[in-house]
Image (cartoon, helix red, strand yellow):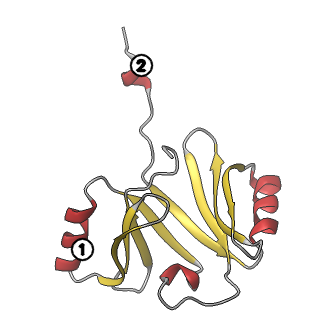
Amino acid sequence: MTSPADTERPTPTIFPAMKYRDGHAAIDWLEAAFGFRRHAVHAAPDGTVAHAELALGDDGMIMLGGEPRTPDPDNPWASARLGLYVHVDDIEAHYERAKAAGAVIVRELADTPYGSREYSCRDPDGHLWSFGTYHPKRA
């Protein structure tokens, strides 16, 4: 006999994150064209999409946001069009490992207002990666 643990699918820990010129229009289109459904949508003070999470099927999820009207030089995500967010449990050890391997840290390890502890870096080809304790499926 199989237990529920034998049939449960693992929860993803890597989430593509994209920026769109018009986050609201992108959400509507992704729902209509690909069948995504809104998991969470958070508005920025100016009414644009600050952060959204869209689910597909039982375990697929992407994150997206609208492009900010005012660039933020302290936030690498403000100008990135595409990157990856990866959930990790031991963020301090992960951060030290990445630094030791020569990752270019573009946002230092810090606590966020939404309860995560995370950092961002670029790989040798310049791709943006963020690692943190936030997990959209568990939030």
For the residue marked with disc 2, what is the amino acid?
Answer: Pro
Dot 1: few (<14), some (14–19), or many (≥20) neighbours within 10 Å?
Answer: some
Q: Residue at x 81, y 61 (%)?
A: 29
Label 1 belongs to which residue? 98
Task: Locate residue 123: give its quadrant.
Answer: bottom left
Badge 2, how many Cα within 10 Å: few under 14, some, many 20+?
Answer: few
Residue 14 left/right relative to 53:
left
Lateral position of residue 55 relative to residue 92, left or right:
right
| 14 sits left or right of 82 in the view | left
Under mark 1, the amino acid is Ala
Seen from the viewer's position, the closer of residues 100 and 69 is: 69
In-front residue for pair 124/103: 103
The number of numbered discs placed on residues in the rendered structure image is 2
Find residue 131 and report its horizontal and vertical position in percent: 37, 65
55 versus 25 height, above or below: above
Q: Answer above or below: position of 47 versus 27.
A: below
| Residue 70 falls in image quadrant | bottom right
Query: SS class of the residue under badge 2?
Result: helix
Quadrant (top left, top right, bottom left, bottom right) of the N terminus: top left
Residue that appears at 54% across and 42% down: 59
Q: Position of residue 139 (x, y in %)?
A: 51, 46
Q: Which mark is residue 135?
A: none
Q: Position of residue 110 (x, y in %)?
A: 35, 71
Question: Which residue lies under the disc numbered 2?
Answer: 4
> In terms of sequence position, does the residue under pointer 1 or pointer 2 come before the other?
2
